[in-house]
Amino acid sequence: TPFQIEQVRSPHPLEDVTVDARFTGHPDVLSLIKAGDADFGGTTNELAAGAQVISVSALRRSADAAEADVRLSVQLQNVDNGWLYDSAPLRAGSAFTLRTPRYEVRGVVTRLTPASAGGTKP
């Protein structure tokens, strides 16, 4: 039976980490972001590692652009004291793309807080 591999991950366990990100873009697109939205990246596999929107700030608008702060619960792997999301490093300042069936927005990670610790992981 032919098959296709959707994700390749290291053997490190997934950990739930709270990630804060600031997304910018057209107000009509950013207004689609809602608590509970799930990011499946390039896959439609709901069992794949992903992220879920916890909360969204009110939009801050200017002319034809807007920005919103979004809190996400993201499944990351701790590898060599760094976090990996979808096999790529994720840290404050990293680009983050949130993809759902309804929209795709790009932003910047502003903070990561592991569920098991009170501080930010390097």
Image (cartoon, rainbow, N blue to C red):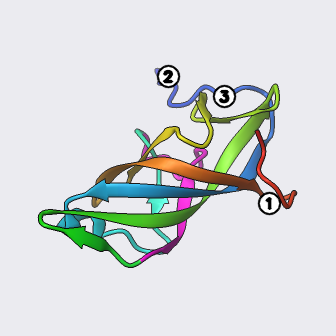
Q: Secondary structure at mark 3?
A: loop
| Disc 3 + disc 1, Cβ < 8 Å | no
Gap between marks 2 and 1, in whole Å? 40 Å
- For marks 2 and 1, the one nearer the N-term is 2
Q: Quadrant of the C terminus?
A: top right
Q: Is residue 47 magenta?
A: yes
User: Which class describes the residues within 10 Å of circle 1: few (<14), some (14-19), or many (20+)?
Assistant: few
Residue picked out by circle 1: 115
Q: Residue at x 48, y 60 (%)?
A: 38
Gap between marks 3 and 1, in whole Å? 21 Å
Tell me the amino acid under the disc marked 2. Answer: Thr
- In front of the other: 51 or 65: 65
**Location of residue 65 in the rendering, given as x and y in whole percent from the top left corner:** 19, 61
- For marks 3 and 2, the one nearer the N-term is 2
- In front of the other: 49 or 95: 95
Number of marks present in the image shown = 3
Q: Residue at x 58, y 44 (%)?
A: 48
Magenta segment: 43-57
